Image: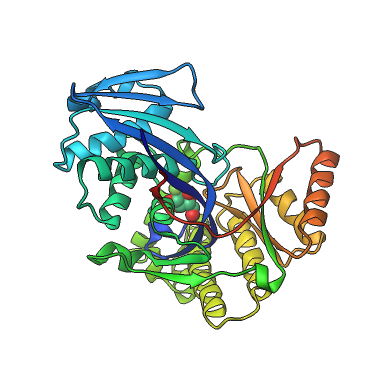
Amino acid sequence: MQKWIAPGRVNIIGEHTDYNAGFVLPIALSLGVVCAAEPRADGLVRLTSAQRPGDIVVARVDDLVAQRDRLPGWARYPLGVVDEFVRGGHPVGGVNLELDGTVPIGAGLSSSAALCCAVTIALRDLFAPALTDRRMIEIARAAENGFAGVPTGLLDQAASILCTEGHALFLDIRAFTGAESCAAEQIPFDLRSAGLTLIVADTGHPHELADGGYAERRAQCEAAADALNLPALRDATSEDLPRLRDSVLRHRARHVITENARVLAVVDRLRDGADPRAIGELLTSSHRSLREDFEVSAPTLDLAVDAALDAGAYGARMVGGGFGGSIIALVEHADHVAERIMNRFAAAGFASPHIFAVEPGTGARTLE
Ligand code: GAF
């Protein structure tokens, strides 16, 4: 069977800005989801996952929505993609899909987008070779938002499809959404020659986008934009904040306004070829803003960030939707910082985090 792979991501900066039409700056990981696929002629999808060895899911392609409620949760992501192909007028006569992933699930590293994007690129090559990258991103997102019922923005799917090795992907989500082609800029992101490493600490405290916190933040951002009479919080400035009477909405809006400014500042510094250490302070202020204004951090994330900074990191912050998951830290001495984080977790009685170094990898592609 032919195979395709789509990676997970870490977002360098620009958190909870995507659904506010703002800016993001992710890199792809080398961890990903592999999809082996082959057509079949009987109108059925047969789906397996190495991570769910007991489940063999068989469903009819032509009325997936009617079968949705009897499907295991994990299978709704890949089958949502199949359903999007069919709805988009790209007939899938039947297909075998075998999935195997290395992105930790619930770690804020976008395992679900990697899953949807791996299936999307496989189905593109098998059934709809003219599909653009942009359409693939839309299909993967629609599958997640609709069939799987998780209200994500575009960040994760865009990162999984568009990232390139050695670069961070700068996306202006509004320009991207409005443009015919993919409005994206690849920003060189070379830490190694500056003697730096980006580490991820997966706290093992899982985050869950399907529960209420993420959807509630989205609703609060929309309410703040409505109260300001703006199309999206992307259009707000600090001068607008006093007009928001509700202090929760004011704090949410302040995060989005300041986070967008931080993304632009990081991109400017990297474009100018500045020492990447110069972005560290912006990463740390992003974390503070996510913790205090957006209130999506968690005790394990705060501890990991504090421990990394105390151990000499240039900057550190939580990544992804929050309420658990992972942090990143920009460091010179990765082993030393990792050890200090482990010690602080042990002293606090938390389970050991999983800590590893990451480099900007390649987006979704054929594997063999
Ligand atoms: C999750 C979502 F899927 C993204 O769309 C994004 O909103 C992110 O949380 C927060 O930046 O990963």
Relative depth, front residue between 167 and 235: 167
The image position of residue 61, as x and y in percent, is 21, 26
Residue located farthest toward the bottom when viewing the structure as drawn: 272
Q: How is the image coloured?
A: rainbow
Horizontally, is 300 left or right of 235 in the view?
Answer: right
Q: Taking 35 as reference, is 251 left or right? A: right
Q: Quadrant of the N terminus?
A: top left
- At horizontal 26% and vertical 45% (from top left) the residue drawn is 124
Where does residue 328 sit, x and y in percent of width and height? Answer: 64, 56
At 74% across and 49% down in the image, what residue appears?
Answer: 303
Q: Is there any visible trace of residue 142 in the rendered image?
A: yes
Query: Taking 98 as reference, is 150 above or below it?
Result: below
Please indicate whether residue 357 sits to the left or right of residue 220 in the image: right
**Residue at x 76%, y 65% (from the top left corner):** 332
Q: Nearer the viewer, residue 340 or 350?
A: 340
Measured as percent of width and height from the top left, residue 247 is found at 52, 58
322 or 289, which is in the foreground?
Answer: 322
Residue 102, how many percent across, how many down?
54, 39
Quadrant of the image occupied by residue 63 = top left
Q: Nearer the viewer, residue 98 or 291?
A: 98
In the rendered structure, the answer to whether residue 85 lies left or right of residue 146 reads: left
